[in-house]
Image (tube, rainbow, N blue to C red):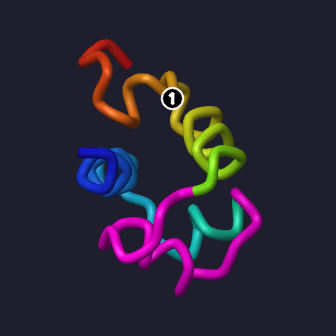
């Protein structure tokens, strides 16, 4: 759920992976692994992503459908 949500949010904003990665302070390669579900997203990165997209962490992890 989370992997699809962060990809959808990025695409909805017409942002490239490089842009999001730069904004949250990681490499594009690491961010790509987040979207593909190859690595677990650390809590601090979840918070940064939620802040970037103006949504809750609960929304990112699928606990609610309300951003």
Name the secondary structure under disc 1: helix
Name the quarter where the N terminus is drawn: top left
- Whether 10 is drawn above or below 29: the answer is above
Asked if the stretch drawn in magenta spans residue 30, the answer is yes
Mark 1, other Cα within 10 Å: few <14 / some 14–19 / many ≥20: some
54 vs 60: above or below: above
Total marks in image: 1
User: What residue is drawn where x is 24% and y is 53%?
Assistant: 4
Query: Who's the residue at 45% across and 72% down the image?
Result: 39
Most distant residue in the bottom direction: 29
Left or right: 8, with 52 as reference point: left
Closer to us: 23 or 56? 56
For the point 39% across and 54% down, the residue is 10
Residue hosting label 1: 57
| Rendering coords of residue 51 (x, y %) | 64, 33
Q: Which residues are magenta?
A: 24-41
Q: Is residue 41 above or below residue 43?
A: below
Which x, y percent locates residue 23? 70, 59
């Amino acid at each position: 759920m989370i992997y699809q949500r962060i990809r959808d949010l990025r695409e909805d904003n017409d942002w490239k992976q490089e842009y999001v990665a730069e904004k949250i302070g990681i490499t594009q390669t690491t961010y790509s692994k987040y979207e593909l579900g190859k690595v677990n997203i650390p809590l601090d990165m979840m918070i940064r992503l939620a802040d970037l997209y103006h949504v809750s962490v609960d929304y990112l992890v699928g606990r609610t459908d309300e951003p």
